[in-house]
Amino acid sequence: MSTFTTYDLAVSVLTRGLLTFDHVLHKAEAHAKANGIDADATYPSARLIADQHPLVFQVQNATKTVRNYVITLTGEDVPAFDDKEKTFADLHARIQSALALLKKVTPDVANERGDSQSSTFNPSGSYPVTLKAKDAVLFQAIPNFIFHLTTGYSILRAQGVPVGKTDFIANFIGVPGFD
C-alpha cells in the first residue's frame, strides 16, 4: 500500500493543478486568436451563470488557496495577492507567482507541520471546523482548489474554448507536452 505525506499531497496536487490552469488559459488564448476574439475583453469576466463569479475570480481563489496552504505548511508569512488581474498576462503571472510560492515548501517542514499544526475554517459562517493541517490539505485545500480549477475550465468550455478531459487531467498524470 502506498502512503502519501502532507508534502506529497499538497505540493504535487497544487502544482499540477496550477499547470493545468495555465495550460487551459493558453488554449483559450489560442482559440481566441484563431477566431478573432479579444481574449482579454471576453474571457476574464465570463461566467457560467449570472450569480457565479467570473474566470478571473476562479484563478484568484485557486491561487489564494495555494498561498494559504504555503503559510500553513511553512509557518512563514506570505504577502497576499493584490487581486488586480484583468488580462491573460495578469492571470499567467499570478499562476507563476503561486507556483513560486509552492517551491518554498520543504518536505520536512511541511510533513512536521501537517502532523502538529491545526487549521480552523468557517465555510458556512456558522460552524467552524478545526482540522490537523494534513487533513485540511486533503479535505479543504484540494477540494477548494479543484472547485475553482473546474469552474474556470467550465467557464472557458462554455465560451467555446475547445478544451477536453485530456486538457484537464494530463498534468495530473504527467502526460508529456501539457505544461
Image: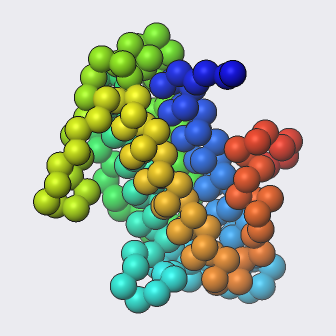
- Give the answer, above or below, for where 61 lies relative to 161: above
Along the line of sight, the residue nearer the viewer: 134 or 44:
134
Q: At which x and y percent is residue 152?
A: 55, 67
Give the color scheme: rainbow, by chain, secondary structure or one colour: rainbow
Q: Residue furthest right?
A: 176
Give the residue drawn at x 22%, y 62%. 124
- Outermost residue on the front side: it is 1
Residue that lies at the very extreme toward the top in this rendered image: 108
Percent from the top left, x then y, of residue 7? Answer: 51, 24
Question: Which residue occupies 29% across, 44% down?
Answer: 80
Q: Is residue 170 above or below residue 147?
A: above
Quadrant hosting residue 43: bottom right
Q: Tell me what residue is drawn at x 39 percent, y 46 percent.
A: 140
144 left or right of 175? left
Residue 165 lies, with reference to residue 82, above or below; the image says below
Coordinates of residue 157 in the picture (x, y in percent): 67, 77
**Vertical placement of 57 versus 118: above or below?**
below
- Between 58 and 137, which is closer to the camera in this rendering? 137
- Is residue 117 at least partly visible in the picture? yes
Tell me: 14 left or right of 174: left
Query: Which quadrant holds the N terminus?
Result: top right
In the figure, residue 141 lies in which quadrant? Answer: top left
**Residue sticking out furthest to the left:** 126
The residue that appears at 76% across and 63% down in the rendered structure is 165
Q: Is residue 100 visible?
A: no
Residue 57 spot, x, y in % from top left: 41, 66
The number of numbered badges drawn on the structure is 0
